Amino acid sequence: MATIFWRVVKESLPTLMLVTLAQMATGVALNFGVEIWIALPALLVLVPPINDLGNDIACVVSSKVTTLLALGLIRPGMKAEGSLRNLLAAVTFVVVFSTTFLAFFSSFFTGLMRIRSAALHIVVAVCLMAGLMLMVPVVTLSILTAFVAWRLGLDPDNVTIPILTTVSDLLGVLCVIAAAKVLMLV
Amino acid sequence: MAAVAQVWKMVRESTLSELISISGGTVAGLLLASMLDFIERVPSLVFLLPGFLALRGSIAGAMSARLGTALHVGTIEPKIGLNPELLENLSASMFLSVVVSVWAGFLSHFICTLLHVQSIGVLKLMLVGLVGGALSSVLLTPFATVAAILVFKFGVDPDNVMGPIITTVGDVVAVLCLLAAYWIVEGWV
């Protein structure tokens, strides 16, 4: 009786409690940027989609690298092989395209809802800068953790994704704050 | 030329789901921006929010992944109705959601104390977690179940589509539930 219930609870509870603890760091980062959000609430609108983008990059890159390793198309090492270079090119294109879309999409709705925002070209710059800044560490960490998990004989799909999405949430908030600071919006 | 074709294939396959995911995230962001006065007034909620958001995706996402496997294996039939395995999956997700949300409330108070940020109190934060976790699991868990079954019935593999669907719907539902939970607890306690 209730074997599935207890198995699911037993397997998931420790990880979920740890992930929740780690997510407190993202809360601290959000709190750190509170002056920015109050000055320009439209930048807070960008945080969840930038985090979604980071999570998706982590999932796609670590899954693809795992598949490429399993197929023997790449080997764990520092040399960027053909398939890996193609993956990086595709991710860069998707990040540039998606963040530009995000700038237009969010500006349309912040304008409609009269949420205080910067000029459109500034929002485009913030989105592009935050997206590209986020891409570099997330892609690097995704590849490295996939390699390490592979070498240790763990299934990277089960190990890397929960770690990476937690780290990328924290980095996502920090990248939006950094982009706003670099462009001297606040 | 082969390299260009390979890059183009990856771009084509991931761009659409990325745009959907970003659009859903923007809706959650708009909700967040509209509750900015809360964030100013109740800073302790800021610490609760990311954990609460991540939790929705991981619990409902994991449940839909388990259902996807059970549907493929045939231990759950693709029809809307309750069978023992489905019921156990549903109740496990709801239980996890509530327990981990209360834990998130407790941790938020601890972080507030550590950073000398004004907290609404450990009991209230744990209650916000409890009510928010219960509300969002009552909404999200049945949604994930019905969506996984319907998607499977239409011949689409739930493993491929349920992730982005749950993240998108989960973000919006989580922000709304957290807000509702705060209102309920403030009016109650």
Image (tube, rainbow, N blue to C red):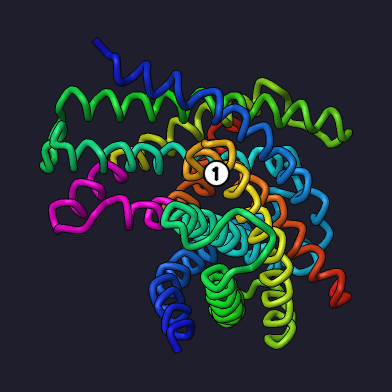
* A114 versus B95 height, above or below: below
Q: Is residue A109 visible?
A: no
Magenta stretch secondary structure, dominant:
helix
Q: Residues within 10 Å of mark 1 (few under 14, many from 20)?
A: some
Measured from the top left, where is residue A24 in percent x and y?
A: 71, 38
In this picture, residue A141 sits left or right of residue A88: right
The picture quadrant where one finds residue A50 is bottom right
In this rendered view, identify the residue nearer to me: A175 or B14: B14
Residue at horizontal 14 percent and vertical 58 percent from the top: B154
Pick the residue in front: B40 or B2: B2
Residue at (67% x, 53% y) in the render: A141
* B159 lies above or below B8: above
Q: Mark 1: which secondary structure? A: helix
Q: Would you identify the image quadrant in which residue B160 lies?
A: bottom left
Q: Position of residue B42 (x, y in %)?
A: 73, 41
Read off the chain for label 1: A
Question: Among all residues in the image, which is located at the extreme top?
Answer: A1
Q: Which residue is mark 1?
A: A150
Q: Quadrant of the N terminus of chain A?
A: top left
Q: Measuring from the top left, give residue A5's x and y in whole percent.
A: 33, 19
Relative to A138, residue B57 above or below: above
Residue located at (24% from left, 54% from top): B157
* Residue B184 in sight from this viewpoint: yes
Q: Is residue B59 magenta?
A: no
Q: Which residues are magenta?
A: B143-167
* Screen quadrant of the C terminus of chain A: bottom right
Position of A77 with respect to A9 (left or right) is right
Q: Amino acid at mark 1?
A: Trp
Q: Number of numbered discs present?
A: 1
Q: Position of residue A151 (x, y in %)?
A: 58, 42
